[in-house]
Image (cartoon, rainbow, N blue to C red):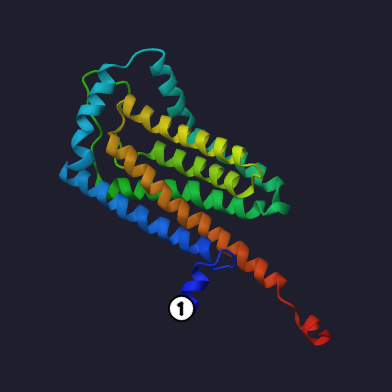
């Protein structure tokens, strides 16, 4: 038992600390999402402030903020995210020699896979969208969790993870993480501002995205480490020479 725990907390190795951290983050995200979903179902907790926040943002909306919010919404629509993923995928493909293919796999699993998961969750909870007399945006689909926000969380989460894992200077890492966080936050705010979602829809999407990212990135990292470990093992010919 002690050896098993030590192996899970060892920084190196294919099933070491990175896998333990990923599993812990995934379980924490699942628990947090469950809390938000329960609040939504019971209109309690964070969901109790939904209508107040949404109404305040809708009433106080004005230019140039409305145009800025539309920009972030369009950037993280299905078409916008597809373009972002294509650009990032091309970047990872060109860096195949530097573990780029594993990041490409993580990107493909994270963003499209997470967006499909979000559609499933929408149909499970079937929450109606906010209603206003003069809406800026009207949609017929379900509200919880926010699709735009989860797409932003997934894409910029991959970008931030890549920077943290590969950038040499800590200032670059901090700048990319801060920029990615800002992009996700502004996307979520834009959805509330435009009247498409409640705050709890956005919060639930962020938590959902973090949990799915933990699964995808940890899984791809484990695959990379496992294949590297196999490649480092001596083959039959090397064993006979020894």
For the point 36% across and 43% down, the residue is: 205
Q: Residue 226: in sight, yes or no?
A: yes
Q: Quadrant of the N terminus?
A: bottom left
| Residue drawn 27% across the image and 21% down it | 58
- Please, is residue 193 above or below residue 198 in the view? above
Residue 40 place in picture, x, y as percent? 22, 43
Rendered location of residue 162, percent (x, y)? 59, 47
Q: Report the residue that reaches farthest toward the top.
A: 63
CA neighbours of label 1 inside 10 A, class few (<14), some (14 to 19), many (20+): few
Quick check: 185 above or below 19? above
Callout 1: SS: helix
Question: Which residue is painted at 32% across and 21% down in the image?
Answer: 136
Identity of the residue drawn at 46% across and 38% down: 152
Left or right: residue 164 compared with residue 113: right
Q: Is residue 24 left or right of residue 201?
A: right
Question: Horizontal placement of 106 versus 113: left or right?
Answer: right
Q: Position of residue 131 (x, y in %)?
A: 22, 27
Q: Quadrant of the C terminus?
A: bottom right
- Front in this rendered view, residue 25 or 108: 25
| Residue that protrudes farthest toward the right in the picture | 241
- The image shows residue 29 at horizontal and vertical percentages of 36, 52
* Depicted 190 relative to depicted 83: above or below: above
Out of 68 and 75, give the one closest to the viewer: 68
Q: Is residue 73 above or below residue 115?
A: above
The residue that disc 1 covers is 2
């Amino acid at each position: 038992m002690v050896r098993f725990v030590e192996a899970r907390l060892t920084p190196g190795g294919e099933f070491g600390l990175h896998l333990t951290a990923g599993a812990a983050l995934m379980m924490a995200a699942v628990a947090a999402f469950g809390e938000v979903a329960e609040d939504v179902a019971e209109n309690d907790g964070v969901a109790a402030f939904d209508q107040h926040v949404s109404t305040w943002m809708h009433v106080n909306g004005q230019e140039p903020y409305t145009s800025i919010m539309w920009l972030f919404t369009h950037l993280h629509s299905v078409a916008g995210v597809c373009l972002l993923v294509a650009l990032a995928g091309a970047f990872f493909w060109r860096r195949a020699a530097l573990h780029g293919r594993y990041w490409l796999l993580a990107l493909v699993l994270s963003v499209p896979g997470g967006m499909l998961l979000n559609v499933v969750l929408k149909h499970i909870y079937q929450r109606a969208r906010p209603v206003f007399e003069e809406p800026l945006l009207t949609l017929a689909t379900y509200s919880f969790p926010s699709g735009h926000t989860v797409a932003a969380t997934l894409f910029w989460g991959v970008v931030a993870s890549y920077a943290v894992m590969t950038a040499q200077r800590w200032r670059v890492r901090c700048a990319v993480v801060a920029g990615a966080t800002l992009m996700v936050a502004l996307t979520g705010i834009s959805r509330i501002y435009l009247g498409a979602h409640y705050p709890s829809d956005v919060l639930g999407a962020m938590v959902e995205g973090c949990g799915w990212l933990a699964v995808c990135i940890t899984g791809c990292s484990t695959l990379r480490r496992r294949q590297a470990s196999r490649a480092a093992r001596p083959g039959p010919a090397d064993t006979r020479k020894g």
